[in-house]
Amino acid sequence: MNNMQNFTKGFFKENAVFVLLLGMCPTLGVTSSAINGLGMGLATTFVLIMSNLVISLVSTMIPDKVKIPSFIVIIASFVTIVDLVMAGYVPALHEQLGVFIPLIVVNCVVLGRAEAFASKNKLVPSIIDGAGMGLGFSMALTMLGAVREFFGTGKVFDFPIFKENYGMLVFVLAPGAFLALGYLIAIINRLRKA
Amino acid sequence: MAGKKESTFINMVLVLFIITLVASAALGGLYELTKEPIAKAKLNKKLKAIEEVVPAFDNNPSEEMYEVAMPSGDKLEFYPATMGGKLVGTAVKTFTTNGFSGYVWVMVGFKPDGTVNNYSVLEHKETPGLGTKMADWFKPVDPTKVKLSLVEKLGKLVGIKPAATKGGAEGDKKSIVGKNPGTINFTVSKDGGDIDAITAATISSRAFLDAVQTAYNEYMKKNNNKEISHVGTHSSATSKQATNSNKEGGKS
């Protein structure tokens, strides 16, 4: 598999949300609007790239039986680093995304890629895999957020399409996340098989 | 894989020890590095919030800050804002534990008579997209700043007039600005109050109003026995002394 395929597989063929069904907790939880989805996606992308980078470097030194605990420590460290640096130097952005950052630790996309890809591959492909998977994850979350925001409040990225009063509030609430995600997965699967 | 470490006891302990050591050292160092910027950012946010919620002032409210301990152990912070020695408003950093997920911290500004001047939500963990709306929900709607939706714009092109933005009765019922918790019932309309709750976030709305009410109660308690002395002494005394007299007034 070349680097290009490595990068693009995260968007469509092996999209974390629509195909692998990984990381459902943040996917369902934070996508009440498009901007929330995008923010969560990009923060995850950063952690994914960094953890893939480190894990691909140190994986040969880690005995198999303590692989998972080691990966979790590495991932949690990067999440805390992101959290602290953002709180200190970009407080405005941190305010927007603050609630999502600690959630990244429990995101199985990150651990999944560490286990399935980074621990078996070299540095460069691992970074590319992290970037592709992360951006694909961001794309999926933004799409889901946009759909929910549109039906729920009549806006997309805060840009009003129709009046908020006519929105179906259920789409912003938890059940709407399942509904929207289900239909999006169905559409993507149809397209994939076509 | 070549060179893979065996899962022996020594290996596992050693590897985990090194990884956690490196991670904690890195995080500890970073924490020290970012401690100051984070504290600074928080302070800036607080100062900005004070400026936002009280009318224009020329003193330094942080220097005259006084606190009131609540039964829960947390403190309300009062920031009196004066203009030319005259009290123009007080910013109160207040909180509630009734939020949908934990504490909600609000900076609310009162005019001397207890009317809400403005507010600013400082910290909360409410649901994004629902409870988070409290940042603007309880402020009055400015009809000139309401953006027309795309459908309305298209409608306008073919000659359909957009519906008027609700500024009047319904818009007013959401807002707490310019209202006095002493005369208006600061609970959500579902509970028989005079304020409309955020759609689908009644708990967050209740919590928010609870925080404002707490601030108002403590503010009035303070003000009833020392408001006059505060305004009176302020022009002649330095701000430090004024703060002290506030504190004594509150205790008596």
Image (cartoon, rainbow, N blue to C red):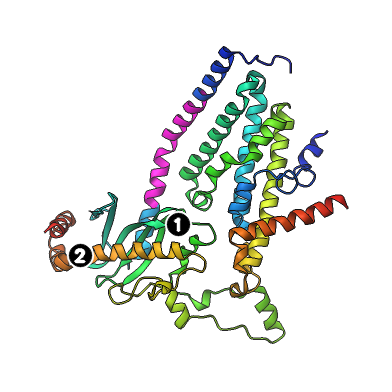
Quarter containing the N terminus of chain B: top right
Residue A53: x, y in percent? 65, 30
Residue at mark 1 shares a chain with residue at mark 2: yes
Quadrant of the rendered image containing residue A114: top right
- Magenta-highlighted residues: B22-44
Few, some or many residues within 10 Å of mark 2 (<14, 14–19, 20+): few
SS class, disc 2: helix
Task: Please say if the residues under marks 1 and 2 sit with CB atoms less than 8 Å apart.
Answer: no
Q: Is residue A77 above or below residue B100?
A: above
Q: Is residue A10 above or below residue B169?
A: above
Residue, disc 2: B221
Residue, disc 1: B100
Determine the residue positioned at 43% across, 65% down. Answer: B205
Residue B219: x, y in percent? 24, 64
- Could you say which is closer to the camera, residue A103 or residue B119? A103
Q: Disc 1 or 2, which lies upstream in sequence? A: 1
Q: State the separation of the CA atoms marked 1 and 2.
A: 28 Å
- Could you say which is closer to the camera, residue A6 or residue B9? B9
Which residue is situated farthest in the right direction here? A194
Q: Chain of mark 1?
A: B
Quarter containing the C terminus of chain B: bottom left
Quadrant of the rendered image containing residue A113: top right
Q: Chain of mark 2?
A: B
Could you tell whether B57 is left or right of A29 in the image? left
SS class, disc 1: loop
**Circle 1 or circle 2, nearest the eye:** 1
Residue A38: x, y in percent? 63, 52
Q: Amino acid at mark 2?
A: Lys
Whether the magenta-drawn stretch holds residue B24 is answered as yes
Q: Is residue B78 visible?
A: yes
